[in-house]
Image (spheres, rainbow, N blue to C red):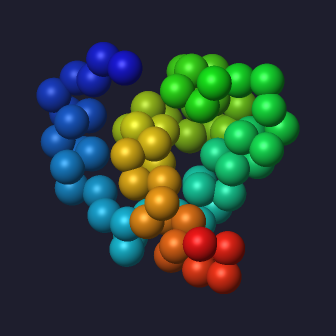
Amino acid sequence: MRMERWERDLLASTTVEDFSKDKFDRFVKVQKKGGLNMVDSRVQTRAQIDKVDHFFILSNYEALQNKFYPEEG
């Protein structure tokens, strides 16, 4: 995934503590439906998230899972 400098800067300033549960849940919903590799950029459209959020989730999936659903971790 190619990112512009401003996107990289935004990604660097995003934290697990501040990340939206709603965005994570939309990503997981697409994941559970199947049919797409979760790295595919079409995930962004289907989950209604932007590229920065998509990359953040991919990079921090386990930490987000533990934050929002600790009983499943």
Is residue 52 or residue 67 the one in the foreground? 67
Pinpoint residue 33: horizontal percent, then vertical percent. 83, 38
Residue at the image position 57 percent from the left and 21 percent from the top: 40
Residue at the image position 52 percent from the left and 27 percent from the top: 39
- Quadrant where the image shows the N terminus: top left
- The answer to whether residue 72 is left or right of residue 51 is right
Residue at the image position 74 percent from the left and 39 percent from the top: 30
Pinpoint residue 21: horizontal percent, then vertical percent. 59, 66
Q: Residue furthest top?
A: 2
**Residue 58 falls in image quadrant:** top left
Q: Residue furthest right?
A: 33
Is residue 37 or residue 46 the one in the foreground? 37
Would you say residue 27 is visible in this rendering? yes
Q: Is residue 64 above or below residue 58?
A: below
Q: Is residue 5 above or below residue 1?
A: below
Q: Is residue 15 above or below residue 9?
A: below
Would you say residue 53 is visible in this rendering? no
